[in-house]
Amino acid sequence: MPVDETSQPIELLVSVSREAPGTLGSQIEDQFRRAIRDGTLKPGARVPSTRDLARQLGVSRRIAVDAYAQLAAEGYMALRQGARPHVSETAALAGETVTTQQTRPPRFDFRPSVPDVSTFPRAAWLRSLRDAVTTITDADLGYGDMRGVEALRAALADYLGRVRGVAARPANVVVTCGYSQGLAVVCQALAAGGAKRVALEDPTWPEQVQTVARAGLEPVAVAVDEAGMRIDLLEEAKADAVILTPAHQHPMGVVLTGERRTQLIAWLRERDAVAIEDDYDAEYRYDRAAVGALQGLEPDRVVYAGSASKTLAPALRIGWLVVPPALLDAVTAEKVLADRGTGRIEQHAFADFLTRGELDRHLRRMRARYRTRRDALIEAVRDELPEATVRGIAAGLHALVELPHSYDEQAIRDGARDRRIHLETMRDYWPKPSGGPPTLMLGYAKMSEPTIRAGVLELAEAVRAARA
């Protein structure tokens, strides 16, 4: 059957042999059927024209035309005059059991540390990205400096010095694919240098414990109280490094006090140790003045780490490290082994975004919006759960809701899940079981004020049901 097809060639992994059993046409048909049945060729997938297929296989076009006609008659192929032949949309995947598990979206999403990505400044980012693609040099389209694009490292050094008090030079900035990768390469570098043990805040991110262990280091939990990490316990930990969130401890929301900062710097010098400062959301502050980065007090012993995940969107996989000179070569070497560099076009775009002041403008807008949502959460909790104590609200993207000891935290979690309320509790962050009161972690960044109030009302019903 004649088919009027488009001329652009499409390659396909099909072969025939005159020595194989069966005709050349039947060999073509069998391979197409098999590919469609096992899912290698999906419904709707475009395939070569008969002319193109005949050329690829070195057979006459009539053989290809007859094979396609047979496949079309069986329902495997869709042929239409003037259109590219393709796999039929109704082609069955024989032998495949398809199980589609629909995960219903949450009615109320209180997960902490998740920004409102709907506010991502698309127009401003598109302008920076367009400028980056237009102006990037041929040399910058190669691998380049593994520490990152020079323009971004310079822009980050200026921005972090101005906003966070970081003592940074462009030469000491390493661009990463987010905080998680930054922590991993630093831990690998420490392990390669002979480090054995790393102290972590207790509670802390579970992923940090796993990252430390994966690097071959022993994670050691050090308690956190209302003044931050217990620096007096570091000596007992016998650690070679410490990971902490001094500006806004995650998840408790406390700030490392000035006295403890002084104690920590003294410990780093006495122990000849390194601190890794995770400055994950210090830009979002509401009821207190900005707290400068720990790194500014001891740049030769503190690795400063940040990313765009909380300030802009997790999808923008750009993070940064400000690395002490003694560790710079080792960290750079680990970055090379990790991925040979973060996307350079995006780095140029982010450099332009920073230097034009777009991040500053975005953060000013979001601080006001997040503060309003935080206030709505506090008010709703006080109205619906008067027995609860709200903590950790001066900064960040979540609040702690502490309930009396008599409440069953697991039952509350189960009840919230049944009501399609997504949240986390403190037990998600303690390396060891805690004897503390049931504590809910409620993020407020993603929801509007009316949704926050409705969500807290529903959550309060789950709490009362669990108590009953």
Image (spheres, rainbow, N blue to C red):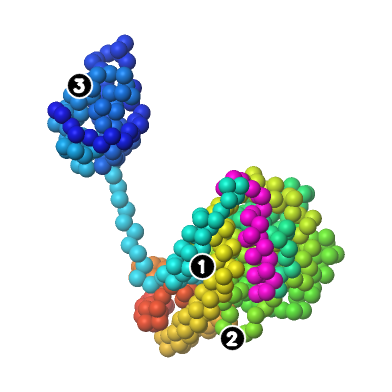
Q: Nearer the viewer, mark 2 or mark 1?
A: 1
The residue under the point 62% across, 60% down is 152
User: Could you say whether the residue bearing mark 1 is in a helix, strand or loop?
Assistant: loop
Quadrant (top left/top right/bottom left/bottom right) for the C terminus: bottom left
Residue 158, percent across and down? 68, 69
The residue under the point 73% across, 59% down is 172
User: Could you say whether the residue bearing mark 3 is in a helix, strand or loop?
Assistant: helix
Relative to 443, residue 371 above or below? below
Answer with left or right where residue 18 lies relative to residue 459.
Answer: left
Relative to 468, residue 48 above or below? above
Asked if disc 1 and disc 3 are in contact, CB closer than 8 Å, the reply is no
Relative to 352, residue 95 above or below? above
Please say whether residue 154 is one of the residues in the magenta stretch: yes
* Residue 405 seen in render: no
Boundaries of the magenta span: 141-164
| Circle on res. 287 | 2
The residue under the point 58% across, 51% down is 137
User: Could you say whether the residue bearing mark 2 is in a helix, strand or loop?
Assistant: loop
| Residue pointed to by mark 1 | 312
Quadrant housing residue 289? bottom right
**Outermost residue toward the right in this view:** 270
| Residue pointed to by mark 3 | 62
The residue under the point 50% across, 82% down is 368
Asked if disc 2 and disc 3 are in contact, CB closer than 8 Å, the reply is no
* Residue 282 seen in render: yes
The alpha-carbon separation of the residues under discs 1 and 3 comes to: 57 Å
Q: Amino acid at mark 1?
A: Leu
Mark before the other along the chain sequence, 2 or 1: 2
Relative to 305, residue 333 above or below? above
Q: Nearer the viewer, mark 1 or mark 3?
A: 3
